[in-house]
Image: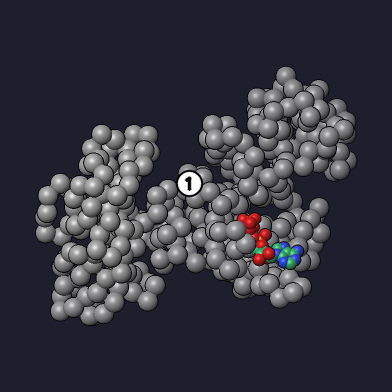
Amino acid sequence: MISLHGLTKVFAGGVRALDALDLTIADGEFFALLGPSGCGKTTLLRTIAGLETPTSGSVRINDTDVTTLPPGRRDVAMVFQDYALFPHMTVSENIAYPLRIRKVPRPERAAKAAEVARRLSLPDLLHRRPAQLSGGQQQRVALARAIACHPAAFLFDEPLSNLDARLRLEARTFLKRLQRELAVTTVFVTHDQAEALALADRVAVMSHGRMIQIGTPAEVFQRPATTFVAAFIGSTPMNLLPGEITSGALHVAGATLPAPAGVPDGDVVYGARPEYLELLREARPGAFPGTVSVLENLGTSTLVTLETDDTLIQAVVPEGDEPPIGTPAWALPHRSLLYRDDRLLRP
Ligand code: ATP
């Protein structure tokens, strides 16, 4: 278990990279940190690892306050984006390195390295050096080194970002299976929201050193707490349309919809994911009218952009169902969210 209390990091120059964070990550949990560049993800990971000293607040790992302990005494293994393998050592020596530091006898080290290498499908490569490996193989060696010493937690900083798209998917599935098998608490930093949603038990979306929302991938996807999270999560961004409620009716993007019960009149932001909009060729009450202006091929589906009087609306339709550019179309929402003062109102 990892718990953070009031964790704050202000860098020289005044950048508040972490702003009074409170968080408990459960034993065995796969926890992903997600957010735009500069929001503090790496700083948080480095602070848990002991590579940064917090300005205030504390870090506990299991029942020990490790805030003032050096990295080597925290029982965590960190895997970086660039893997940080030792170039002069063989794969076997790299994997066994943390055991050497812990003064494990040589034969035991070699046996452990061979066992971990087998688990990660690396046995044929044990005598090679990092320069003789592909990116995917180097990444697995870095993982193997992290696993070899049975840490209380894994800390991953964008470990898949140097892999090409196909290898990255493979490595993702592999990592998820491995984490399930080992059941080691894992904190995973990524700026790739699809990766975070695919891997994690829970996701935290960060902005400016704070956690804007913490939840399961389904919660964060289906019920983003703010428009920032709504815009950030989802492979095609959510439509966020300015609207207004007046006497029980919601006016948005040229359509009038029934307003949800109990919401007072006033301005709102209406959110609908492109996947939850159906595209019609004729008008229907509650559908947003527009003209098709852009078609983008997504493989098995097409992203259609509709131009309305004052805004753009995007809908995903099955490949082959897209109306031609320049023709009128109506986007019918099947699921939507409503925000006021940047807070979720419904469902
Ligand atoms: P990215 O996705 O780009 O890696 P990140 O979310 O990991 O970003 P951090 O690297 O944690 O962000 O940086 C958080 C903020 O702290 C940024 O504004 C960054 O410029 C600042 N920062 C990071 N390290 C230092 C440092 N050593 N000195 C001063 N400011 C720093």
Mark 1: is the Cβ under 8 angstroms from ligand 1?
Answer: no
Residue farthest along the front direction in this orientation: 326
Residue toward you, 73 or 280? 280
**What is the quadrant of the N terminus in the image?**
bottom right
| Left or right side of 226 for 106 | right
Residue 114 vs residue 331: left or right? right
Q: Residue at x 72, y 38 (%)?
A: 142
Q: Which residue has dot 1 on it? A: 194
250 or 221, which lies in front?
250
How many discs mark residues in the rendered view?
1
- In the rendered image, the vertical position of residue 185 relative to residue 266, given as above or below: above
Which amino acid type is marked by label 1? Ala
Residue 341 vs 301, above or below: the answer is: below
Ligand 1 located in image quadrant: bottom right
Going by the picture, which residue comes out furthest to the top?
124
Where the C terminus falls, by quadrant?
bottom left
User: In the rendered image, is residue 8 in sight?
Assistant: no
Q: Residue at x 76, y 73 (%)?
A: 12
For image coordinates 71% across by 76% down, the residue present is 14
Residue 39 lies, in percent from the top left, at: 60, 63
Q: Residue at x 48, y 46 (%)?
A: 194
